Structure formats: C-alpha cells, structure tokens
C-alpha cells in the first residue's frame, strides 16, 4: 500500500473515526466570523443542516447562557494566541440541558483566512458522573468534619468525668464504638433506600433491631408520614437513636419484660418532622436510672451527646424524664444542611 493510496482514503477514514466516536466536525472562519458543520453538529445545536456557512452567533444562541461567554473566550484565545480550542458547554435537547465537548485547532486557508477546525461530542454521562463524585466528595468532607467534632466533644467530656486513665480509655472506647455503629447504620440505611438520603424509620429499626426480633410487640414504630434526611445528617440522627436505644436497654423500657417503646414519626403542618420517643417502664432499675440522670443530667455523656446531635440536625430537642419513663421529642427540618 502506497502513501498515495492512504491519502486518497483519508476522508473515508476520518468519517469512520468520527462515526465511531459519535462526533461531529465543523470549521469556523474567524476572519469572516462564520461556521459550518456536518449533520451531527447541526443536530447538536438544533439547527437545519446546510453546507453553507452561517454566522457563528447562530450556533452560540442555542448554547446555555452561562456557557456562551466561555465559548467566545476560547475562540478568542485560539484566534489571538493560537491556543488549541477547548470548551465544554450545554445545549437544550427537549426538556434537558445536555453537555457537549468542543476541541479544535487553528489553521489558515490558501487565501489567508484564519480557520478553526474542530469536533464536538456528547459528554452528558461524564458530566453527570463528575457531579455525582463531587457531591460524594463534599458529603465525605461534611461527614468527616462532623465526626471529628463529635470525637473532640467526647474526649473533652471523658477527660472531665474519668476517675483514672483506665476509666477514661474504657469510656472513650465505648463512645467511639457507638460512633462507628451509628456510621454503619446510617450508611446501610442509605444503601437500602437510595443514594442521597434515607428514611428515619429505617434508621430507628436498625437501632432497635435486637429487641424487634425477640419482642416485636414491645416496640412500635409508627411512621405516620414518610420522612428522610440527606446523607450529611444521617450519622447525627443514627447516633441519637443509638444512644436512646442503648439507654433504654440499660435503664428503661427495653430492660424489663413489661416495658414498651413507641416511636412516632410525623410531619407537622409547618413541614417540620416530629420524632417522638416514648418509653413506658416501671421497675427498680428505671427508678434508679432516673435518680442518677436527674442528679447529673446537665453533665452526663448521654445528655451532651443528644444535645450535640440535635444541634447538628438544627433540631429542637425536648426531653422529659417522667415517672413512667423517658419521653423525647425532636422537631427537625427534613432537609437541613
């Protein structure tokens, strides 16, 4: 095969390459400020196909207003500095804005015209993936910051209340284990529901799962309205419910055969989500726990943790230690940031 044969088939090979890459080709005269594109480019910009050059503005007017200036700047850099043309932009297709990439190089015609020759292709799927990864990165940053904030609070609280290095280590270990369990619960709940949020009822079920399995009639989860939280808020809510369930198992309704727990999730008229934790237990351990909590309620780890979680959720917390058991109400905005 000779070089002449290769050159004779160059156009065919170029067309095959463009078709394989789902690309459209175009040429723009920066001297005349006109452009022409093949069928694929015309479909991208939603204009009638024609071999005749048309003003570049005919193409740009179909581009998202926020991207038009970026395209004009990229064209100007190619014309004035000989830079390679590189720009991503959006064009409306039906009800959606689709993303396209543009790449081109500067050349000159035989009569001295400044030409920009390039291609376009659809990158909507790539942009969606980039956006998803960006959201996940921001979410991870948010959750890590929250985790550090909680850990610092736990260390300070543990150092004040510990009577020895051993007791401090044991307390901090238990608290960090609770954090890990809360993180696991929130992550699993998000995977069970959908990618960016999870239902409150699902997290509550996971927190009280050991008691639901053995004595389902003693635990009632009354989901009167479906309520969800974004991933950034799940850890705080999971830690709150985990702390409530742990205390109920130690001192409250989940510790005695005749104890009952009713968890209600509802939505108020103003859109605020109401989370209600209502324990009923009347036995010696519960009375002893009430006495201990009443004495140290302001400084106790549980109270501090509950208040911290409520603040993270931007929620209003009301906690009442009744003779019949604990009643806690949390009023939170469903889409708190």
Image: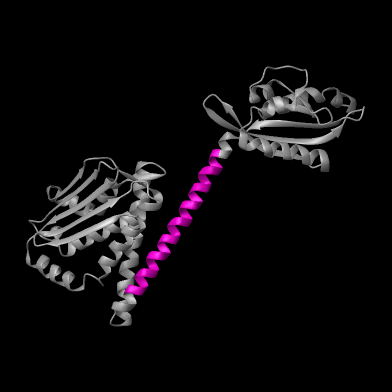
Picture layout, residue 168 above or below residue 150: below
User: Residue drawn 79% across and 39% down?
Assistant: 78
Segment tinted magenta in the rendering: 128-157
In this picture, residue 133 sits left or right of residue 236 = right
Comparing 315 with 164, the one in front is 315
User: Residue drawn 48% across and 56% down?
Assistant: 141
Comparing 10 with 196, the one in front is 196
Picture layout, residue 57 above or below residue 324: above
Location of the N terminus by quadrant is top right
In this picture, residue 32 sits left or right of residue 48 = right
Prevalent SS, magenta region: helix
Q: Is residue 62 magenta?
A: no
User: Residue drawn 75% across and 32% down?
Assistant: 118
In this picture, residue 54 sits left or right of residue 152 = right
The image position of residue 270, as x and y in percent, is 28, 43
Comparing 10 with 193, the one in front is 193
The image position of residue 173, as x and y in percent, is 33, 70
Q: Is residue 149 magenta?
A: yes
Specify the farthest residue to the front. Answer: 270
Specify the farthest residue to the right. Answer: 111
Location of residue 210 by image quarter: bottom left
Picture layout, residue 215 above or below residue 12: below
Which colour scheme appears in the figure? one colour
Picture layout, residue 154 above or below residue 316: below
The image position of residue 283, as x and y in percent, is 7, 64
Total numbered circles = 0
Location of residue 127 by image quarter: top right
The image position of residue 70, as x and y in percent, is 68, 39
């Amino acid at each position: 095969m000779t070089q002449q044969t290769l050159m004779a088939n160059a156009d065919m090979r170029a067309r095959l390459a463009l078709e394989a890459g789902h690309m459209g080709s175009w040429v723009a005269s920066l001297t005349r400020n006109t452009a022409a594109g093949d069928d694929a480019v015309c479909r991208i910009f939603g204009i009638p196909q024609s071999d005749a050059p048309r003003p570049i503005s005919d193409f740009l007017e179909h581009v998202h207003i926020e991207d038009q200036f970026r395209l004009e700047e990229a064209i100007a850099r190619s014309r004035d500095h000989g830079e390679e043309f590189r720009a991503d932009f959006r064009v409306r297709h039906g009800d959606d804005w689709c993303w396209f990439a543009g790449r081109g190089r500067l050349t000159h015609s035989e009569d001295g015209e400044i030409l920009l020759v390039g291609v376009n292709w659809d990158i909507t799927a790539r942009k969606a993936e980039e956006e998803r990864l960006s959201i996940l990165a921001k979410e991870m940053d948010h959750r890590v910051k929250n985790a550090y904030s909680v850990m610092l609070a736990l260390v300070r609280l543990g150092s004040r209340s510990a009577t020895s290095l051993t007791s401090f280590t044991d307390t901090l270990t238990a608290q960090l284990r609770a954090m890990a369990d809360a993180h696991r619960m929130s992550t699993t709940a998000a995977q069970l529901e959908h990618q960016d949020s999870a239902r409150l009822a699902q997290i509550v079920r996971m927190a009280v799962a050991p008691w639901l399995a053995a004595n389902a009639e003693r635990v009632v989860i009354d989901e009167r309205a479906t309520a969800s939280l974004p991933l950034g808020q799940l850890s705080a809510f999971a830690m709150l419910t985990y702390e409530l369930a742990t205390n109920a198992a130690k001192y409250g309704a989940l510790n005695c055969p005749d104890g009952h727990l009713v968890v209600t999730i509802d939505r108020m008229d103003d859109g605020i989500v109401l989370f209600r934790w209502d324990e009923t237990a009347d036995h010696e351990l519960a009375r002893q726990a009430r006495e201990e909590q009443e004495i140290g309620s302001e400084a106790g780890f549980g109270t501090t943790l509950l208040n911290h979680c409520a603040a993270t959720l931007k929620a209003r917390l009301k906690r009442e230690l009744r003779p019949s058991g604990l009643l806690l109400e949390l009023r939170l905005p469903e889409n708190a940031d």
